[in-house]
Image: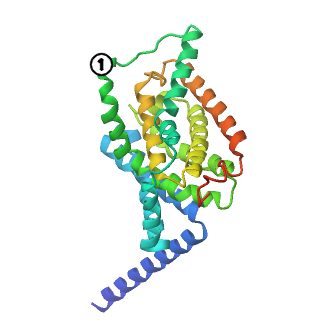
Amino acid sequence: MGAMSEHKGRAKEERTLTAQRLARLARQQPVLSFFLLAYLLSWLLWWPMAATGESRPLLALGSFGPTVAALLLTGLMEGRAGLQRLLRSLFIWRVHPGWYLFGFFGTAAVALAAIGIHLALGGSGLIWNDPRQLYLVIPVFLYVLLFSVLGEEIGWRGYALPRLQATQSALAASIILGVVWSLWHLPLFWVPGNFHQTIPLSLFLLQSVGLTVLYTWMYNNTQGSLLLAHLFHAASNTTLGVLPVLPIDAGGSLRPLWLSVAILWLAVIAVTAHAGPQRLAHAKTASPSA
């Protein structure tokens, strides 16, 4: 009994030391700790699908890695007050109506412009959804919002972005976050049946980094609204699922997607030139955390 009690005591002491080391790492490197934990939580669920095929429950659960990581680290380092401050950003809704228009329809405008150029160049092969099923956009949007986007934005924009901007320019922070966000999806490129298999990783990386700059621009001009970030993310994913931009299979045409990414980067250049790379915001509307 004495040996068993001693063994349990040592195990408890080791767990305590491990927790202390993790807390010290989180204090010293909060952003790196978040990235590592978000990857770990998601990849533990996603990489097995590369061998077994896509699983809706595992795909959805893995999507919550960034949000869970953000909540764990915030609770560990800042307690209840930090969690309340983080979650309060979800309820920042009193912003200029133009940001809602951009959030809901910005990606659609880019996609439609890309499709128009594709058709003007003599392109074909686009398969449009039945317009009589347009009502399905709303349930698709809600599904994406609740089972995918909700698991990401509290982490990427709520936790990582303000901490990156504390030491980097808004543009540099966006590029770093865009690369990390893009590579977080890496296991999905090997999951049979997942749409990421139809997209080159290089193209996805360009798209993710470009979108991240626009997320930062929106975030910094809406007092750090995570509500707008969630709406923009969900609307973007819904748009790419509804409009014929993504190839329907690995052999499909990538031209509409390449055109949309090119237009996206033109928008990024225009926004950066207008708002400035340091803040990506106007003085009167800049987020306090930017």
On the image, the x and y values in percent for residue 26 come to 54, 69
Query: In the figure, is residue 177 to the left or right of 97?
Result: right
Q: Residues within 10 Å of mark 1 (few under 14, many from 20)?
A: few
Locate residue 259: give its quadrant.
top right
Q: Secondary structure at mark 1?
A: helix
Q: Nearer the viewer, residue 125 or 120?
A: 120
Left or right of residue 35, residue 275 in this image: right
Amino acid carrying label 1: it is Arg
| Residue occupied by mark 1 | 132
Quadrant location of the N terminus in the rendered image:
bottom left
**Residue 282 in view:** yes
Taking the view exactly as shown, the residue that stands out farthest to the left is 1
Q: Is residue 41 visible?
A: no
Dividing the image into 4 quarters, which one contains the C terminus? bottom right
Q: Residue at x 44, y 36 (%)?
A: 235
Please name the residue shown 34% across and 83% down the image: 8
